Image (tube, grey):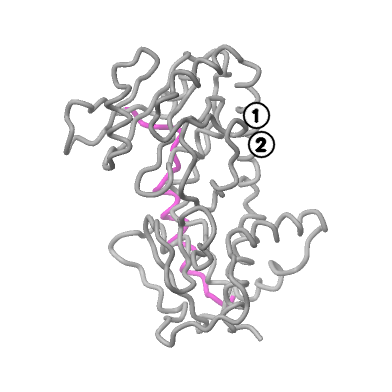
Amino acid sequence: MAFDRQKNNKLLYYSKGFGSMLLPGFLFRQQLKKYLQVVSEEDEAYIQNRVTYYNKLHAGIILPAGTPPLKELRLGKKLKTYFLDSKQIIRYFPQHWRAAFLFGDVTHVPLLPTIVKSRPIGDGNENSVLLKLDKVRHFTFTKDRMNLAQKSDSLVWRGHAHNDRRVSFIRKYQHHPMCDVGQINQDVNSDIVKPRLTIDEHLKHKFILCLEGNDVASNLKWVMSSHSIAVMPKPKFETWFMEGRLEAGKHYICIAEDFSDLEQKLQYYINHPHEAAGIVQHANDYIAQFKNEPRELRIAIRVMQKYFTCTGQIS
């Protein structure tokens, strides 16, 4: 398999993550006030809007007595990226403060306020407090060398197909002349297996399928940062990327849950290139907000500050 130059460098990520853990914690706790200070009025409104989106808790919550302190968050054999991403934020706070964490692909709402990577979209998800976790995998952005007009009038997808929806899509469209789709895992359904493709190879197509797997579609961020267009049903789960705020027809092409209108939707945007280009531009604009790393850190720290405030740990 060819090296995928577009993917994040995991070796560099782990080196920086574990290297930063060698620094004394008090150096970060001394900086907490800086990140809680009010910035410009416009930026402050933006930051608070996102903090409120990620953390919907209200004051007066009492955590169970068994909720562990931050200092007890431990590195396990699996989900190391979740641990490192969490430590990058909680190190700014007193380590005797308490918080619940649930790592992995979370598709339910916990019974108590919990830090998660993903949650169901909609009302009633207040106990799911989002942080930017597993970002080395999920927050990949592309450098697309082709504009939309140069790309093939076709849809592409490669990925692991371990749920019925993905398998159903592949079986429905694996022989369609406008589609190049297949699973890369070889443990089941050998008739729909196709060779892996790099991100650059995906980007030769105007349309890229972004279909939810265990939780969200992990390719959605890099697709929306490219000059191709994300194609998907309305998302059911969300992460730090705020998938719940994406608008059909503005940020992505929305198809039916049973995928029955795929050809109709693709043909429409092939015939209306200006509208297609508009989706690319809106998607790129949406992506831009996540590239301001200092502001991203400030928002994450504010999310945790609100968690500690609402659970009565800050007077």
Residue furthest right as drawn: 41
Q: Position of residue 110 (x, y in %)?
A: 42, 68
Residue type beneath disc 1 = Gln
Q: Are marks 1 and 2 in contact (CB under 8 Å)?
A: yes
Q: Position of residue 27 (x, y in %)?
A: 60, 73
- For this view, does 45 lie left or right of residue 12? right
Question: 219 or 28: which is nearer to us?
Answer: 219
Q: Which region of the structure is painted magenta?
A: 2-26
Q: Is residue 73 above or below residue 45?
A: below
Residue 162 is labelled as none
Is 208 colored magenta in this rendering?
no
Residue that numbered label 2 is attached to: 285
The residue depicted at 51 percent of the width and 32 percent of the height is: 254
The residue depicted at 35 percent of the width and 48 percent of the height is: 214
Q: Is residue 89 above or below residue 228?
A: below
| Disc 2 crowd, CA 10 A, few/some/many (<14, 14-19, 20+) | some
Q: In which quarter of the view is residue 79 placed? A: bottom left
Label 2 secondary element: helix
